[in-house]
Image (tube, coloured by chain):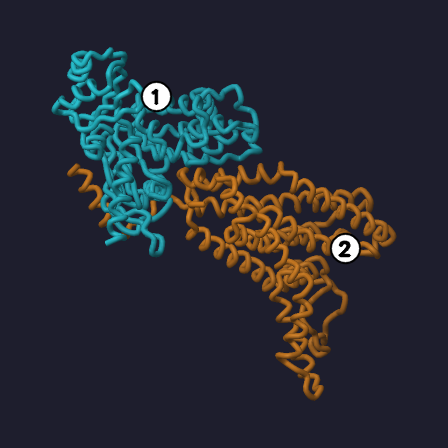
Amino acid sequence: MTQATFQLHEQESGVAQPREGSPWTGMWTVILKEMADHLSSTRIFILDILILLAALGTVYVATQELQQTVGQDQFLYLRLLTNSRQPLPAFVGLLAFFVPLVSIALTFDAVNGEFNRRTMARLLAQPVYRDALLLGKFLASLFTLMLVCTAIWLLIFGIGILRLGVAPGAEEVGRGVWFLLATTFYGGIWIALALVFSVVFRQSATAALASIAVWLFFTVFWGMISGVLAQALSPVRIGFPQEILAQANMELALSRFSPNTLYAETMIALLQPEVRSLGILLPTQLEGAILGAPLPPSQSVLLVWPQLTGLIAASILLFALAYVLFQRQEIRA
Amino acid sequence: MSNSVILTKDLTKRYGDFVAVERLNLEVQVGEVFGLLGPNGAGKTTTILMLLGLTEPTSGSVSVLGLNPGRKPLSVKSRVGYLPDQMGFYDELSARENLTYIARLNNIPGEQVERRVGDSLARVGLEKVASKRVGTFSRGMRQRLGLADILVKQPQLIIMDEPTSGLDPESSHEFLGMIRSLKEEGITVLLASHLLYQVQAICDRVGLFNQGKMVLEGTVEDLAQRVLGGAYRILVDAEGERPAILHTLEKIPQVTHIRISDSSLYQVEASQDIRAEVAQAIISAGGRLLQLGVQAQSLDDIYTAYFKEVEHDAGHISTA
């Protein structure tokens, strides 16, 4: 008894000492289990089939057109991703649409699902921190998304080789890898967003709807809202070119709050080497430029660096929010 | 090292204004089966969560296996098994997969995982359905799987929250047998329940909880002594002239109260075990003694008597 009391005192005095062990203990176990769940779930299987069909459709149409111009174009494999013919959109357009959906579908029940299945108490009674559980779930969704995107990208290049009869060049592959990275970061935002909602709402359906609502807001409404806001914030009173320019810049800046805009700009710069600016270019700025000459990949990456950083930063901020909320959550149902 | 597996000092937990647990001093020794008893909402589950470090105490201190769960959560959780009142599983996974996940989270070396999971499943008699999806399991099977889930990590202390709620009598009997076998292995068990007869059947000591406070603590006999005032209840079945029998029974000095529950049944309350005297009295009164027994004091009686007392006091306060 005296010894036990002594121990208690010792612990009381050691309040400042750090938590025991690494916060990431057991994270890989969580990642592997969650990925196994994702890859075998019907939900993801259905989405995968949808994406696959969309990819095959758009790429098939693109190759039909490209077959005529083989030999004239330096970046056939990039055109494969960006060319569109009515009524089908380009593959990247479809991807910008599907990636948020897949991300949300992977994550909207990550935390509340454990509560609803009553497995949360059981999991947290194991020697793992909440940190490992949450990050493990985030990364599992991210890796699954990466896996799906990479598989589809390889498939498209495969079809390209078969249909076009030309092997992709190093630059095209390099730009493709950057494109995959950017797509993953874009997905990361939606995964982190769905994770926040899955912590906040105890009902999985509510979390899914809330995530979809945010996605719809940015996809459909933010474009209009940023236009209206730009008119209000920097109005064209007299009609000077400066005023018109200021308004256009304002609208662009506002629209960049949407991850969709950031992703679209990243795609344009990475997959269309001729693009040398994402903002408004004045004729004076183009002096001496050879129009239509492609940029080297490093310059294209430099061009979208702010967009890429923005995508990553938004993911991290949203994840941090989910983290803070989850750490404070009571385990009792 | 001390022999205390669980030791709390003035442990308090408040949720806003609501006091869930108030100044709890609990000590559980190695190899003991301790029962936490109390009505729903008395603070049992909150206490358990604090012992596991899943909820931070507002004040006071906790020591589990000599460790502070708030500071050394990994060590505590790898030595303590927790069976929540409704253990959840991943329904789409098999029993073995569910347990393997837990084994890996406990950092059990890869080559041992399969053996340990197999052993645990065999221990609770689920080895034949190990590859079946847990979604197809019955309530009783799930509860046994929950126990297997805990045994995988070979814990020194097992904490159970209402382990037999919702089980049919046979399953719950079986489950109690398993808990008893844990005790034989030297595993300390803390059991929260409101099912008194079960607690009585397997617990060495019990603590009675009410409104966040532990109001009584001790062995079942101890509690009986304190709450029921050490009353013995002797059941007598005797034929014969009732007034004569009653008259002679009342003459025994230790008798405090006699109740007639049926034509030939008498319930004698006394301050001592006076079975011999009662038998003698009945025969001397010309009765035919058919049956005589002393009623074991059950936690039920203690529980009812205690809460009746509390309500009575509360009633006093409100009228005053």
Q: Residue at x 24, y 19 (%)?
A: B242
Indicate which disc residue A90 carries. 2
Element assignment for label 2 = loop
Chain letter matching colour cyan: B
Quadrant where the N terminus of chain B is found in the figure: top left
Q: Residue at x 53, y 38 (%)?
A: A32
Horizontal and vertical percent position of residue B83: 40, 34
Q: Quadrant of residue A307?
A: bottom right
Horizontal and vertical percent position of residue B124: 44, 22
Residue farthest toward the bottom in the current orientation of the protein: A238
Q: Quadrant of residue B209?
A: top left
Image height of B227 relative to B253, above or below: below
Horizontal and vertical percent position of residue B131: 55, 24
Assess whether mark 1 and mark 2 are in contact (beta carbons under 8 angstroms): no
Relative depth, front residue between B115 and A59: B115
Q: Which residue is mark 1?
A: B181
